[in-house]
Image (cartoon, rainbow, N blue to C red):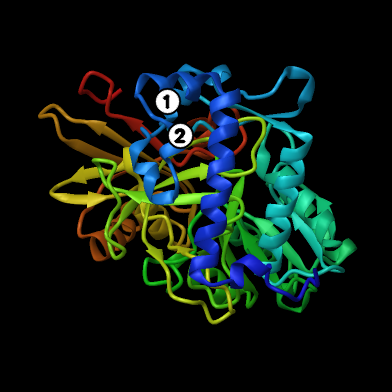
């Protein structure tokens, strides 16, 4: 397939996409019912006859799977003997204890294909050079996926890892990459370092960034404050992505920036309400996935906990697949603060846009009267009442609420940010289960 072409299925008609998914679903159900200890037991207990599941709509007759199931019965999801396992990864543990996932050789090929077509979606081509600013070790799937995908694309990749702006700039100047693979808020740190050391970042070879882990757009696809701040400084193309270890699949924006494109040969997606019923096409729903073509640990109707909108209109790029809107928030991280429903991402967007904020952690806890209370811990260039007022004014203007602000030195803030697995900084701490009092 030419790298300039859209994968055939993504430009196919809706009926052709639907027929393919129904065919792959049937194959997937037979595999799971044969090899998965967890699902075999679940389907039998619920009296589900997989022969009666003819299409994607029939999935509603199968119970959903949750992160709790994965944590409690982790090994029962494995469908292959140990000798077939090539790679072990773990989830980041954002909403609980990390879960181990296993990948076979075929799963790694699938992972490479996923990232290859994702790079194509983001304008990638052979001959490009990607600078990987995320970890490829510590049992982390994303860095490995990007490496495999770039290799399949015929592109170069330089594995710098996360952090260390000095090393990032040394690599950019030595290797001349064309694109970055990066957590977008870190781009601001890279820019800040360049400004402090008189580096003309707008004249480098870097033309784009494939962004991971943080949303770059609002629900209407306009750039978030974070995205705007990056673009104001550095005029590069920003491509937002959404993925998770559980999915082994990415939703990546094309050049038109109107949502992450669905790869129908790799995953089935549903958008469910609190009662596990499909939401109306214009309503917010919890992304629920069924993986296709996974050998090691396939998932059936797995609720990701992520809330978003979805879009089905044909994209100007020619793809006819569903598009995933920006993640609005995680269901378990919803906060009711002074009568307003909030998600941590709203706080991140504001804090990333305030000059002088070096790092932060948002903490939610239960106060003495049983309602949610918020404190934002900040390592800042300034530590005074004037700067605190500036921060609170930003919150008041954007969210109509003002959390407590607690200034911390960089060492203390880093301790708060360090998650147990140490792969990425923790930005949100939920202490609402600590007996109703602040720890």
Residue corresponding to mark 2: 50
Q: Residue 6 in the image: state x and y as whole percent.
A: 68, 72
Q: Residue 429 in the image: state x and y as whole percent.
A: 39, 34
- The answer to whether 6 appears left or right of 416 in the picture is right
Please give the name of the residue rendered at 61% of the width and 54% of the height, measured from the top-left corner. Answer: 265
Please give the name of the residue rendered at 20% of the width and 60% of the height, measured from the top-left corner. Answer: 400
Q: Residue 144 in the image: state x and y as whole percent.
A: 74, 43
Work out whether residue 322 or residue 25 is closer to the camera in this orientation and state it: 25
User: Can you see residue 406?
Assistant: no
- The answer to whether 89 appears left or right of 322 in the picture is right
* Category of crowding for the residue at label 2, using alpha-carbon neighbours closer than 10 angstroms: few (below 14), some (14–19), many (at least 20): some
Work out whether residue 19 or residue 126 is closer to the camera in this orientation and state it: 19
Please give the name of the residue rendered at 78% of the width and 60% of the height, measured from the top-left corner. Answer: 130
- Mark 1: secondary structure: helix
Residue corresponding to mark 1: 43
* Category of crowding for the residue at label 1, using alpha-carbon neighbours closer than 10 angstroms: few (below 14), some (14–19), many (at least 20): some
User: Can you see residue 270?
Assistant: yes
- Mark 2: secondary structure: helix
Please give the name of the residue rendered at 48% of the width and 72% of the height, measured from the top-left corner. Answer: 258
Q: Which quadrant is the N terminus positioned in? A: bottom right
Relative to 252, say whether 380 is above or below. Answer: above
Q: Residue furthest front?
A: 51
Label placed on residue 213: none
- The answer to whether 120 appears left or right of 217 in the picture is right
Q: Earlier in the sequence, mark 2 or mark 1?
A: 1
Query: Which mark lies nearer to you, 2 or 1?
Result: 2
Using the numbered discs, state the Cα–Cα distance from disc 2 to disc 1 in whole angstroms.
Answer: 8 Å
Tell me, yes or no, whether the two marked residues, 2 and 1, touch with CB atoms within 8 Å: yes
Which picture quadrant has residue 154?
bottom right
- The answer to whether 102 appears left or right of 339 in the picture is right
Q: Residue furthest bottom?
A: 316
Q: Residue 156 in the image: state x and y as whole percent.
A: 86, 59
């Amino acid at each position: 397939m030419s790298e300039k072409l859209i994968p055939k299925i993504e430009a196919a008609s809706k009926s052709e996409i639907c027929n393919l998914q129904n065919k792959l679903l049937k194959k997937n159900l037979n595999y799971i019912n044969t090899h998965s200890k967890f699902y075999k037991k679940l389907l039998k207990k619920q009296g589900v006859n997989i022969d009666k599941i003819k299409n994607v709509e029939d999935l509603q007759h199968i119970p959903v799977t949750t992160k709790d199931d994965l944590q409690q019965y982790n090994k029962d999801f494995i469908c292959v003997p140990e000798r077939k396992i090539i790679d072990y990864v773990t989830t980041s543990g954002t909403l609980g204890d990390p879960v181990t996932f296993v990948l076979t050789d075929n799963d790694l090929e699938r992972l490479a294909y996923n990232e290859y077509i994702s790079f194509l979606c983001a304008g990638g081509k052979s001959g490009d050079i990607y600078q990987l600013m995320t970890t490829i070790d510590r049992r982390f799937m994303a860095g490995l996926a990007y490496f495999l995908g770039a290799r399949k694309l015929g592109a170069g990749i330089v594995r710098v890892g996360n952090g260390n702006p000095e090393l990032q700039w040394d690599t950019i100047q030595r290797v001349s990459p064309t694109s970055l693979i990066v957590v977008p808020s870190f781009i601001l740190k890279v820019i800040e370092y360049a400004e402090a050391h008189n580096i003309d970042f707008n004249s480098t070879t870097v033309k784009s960034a494939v962004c991971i882990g943080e949303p770059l757009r609002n629900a209407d696809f306009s750039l978030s404050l974070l995205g705007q701040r990056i673009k104001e400084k550095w005029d590069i193309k920003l491509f937002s992505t959404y993925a998770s270890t559980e999915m082994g699949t990415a939703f990546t924006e094309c050049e038109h920036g109107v949502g992450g494109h669905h790869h129908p040969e790799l995953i089935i997606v549903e958008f469910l309400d609190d009662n596990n019923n499909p939401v109306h096409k214009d309503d917010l729903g919890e992304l629920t996935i069924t993986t296709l073509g996974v050998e090691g640990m396939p998932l059936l109707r797995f609720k990701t906990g992520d809330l978003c909108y979805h879009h089905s209109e044909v994209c100007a790029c020619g793809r006819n697949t569903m598009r995933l809107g920006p993640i609005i928030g995680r269901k378990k991280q919803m906060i009711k603060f002074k009568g307003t429903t909030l998600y941590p991402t709203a706080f991140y967007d504001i804090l990333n846009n305030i000059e002088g904020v070096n790092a932060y952690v948002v903490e939610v806890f239960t106060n003495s009267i049983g309602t949610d209370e918020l404190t934002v811990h900040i390592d800042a260039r300034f530590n005074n009442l004037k700067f605190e007022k500036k921060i609170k004014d930003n919150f008041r203007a954007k969210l109509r609420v003002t959390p407590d602000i607690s200034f911390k030195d960089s060492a203390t803030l880093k301790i708060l940010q360090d998650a147990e697995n140490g792969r990425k900084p923790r930005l949100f701490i939920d202490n609402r289960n600590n007996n109703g009092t602040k720890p």
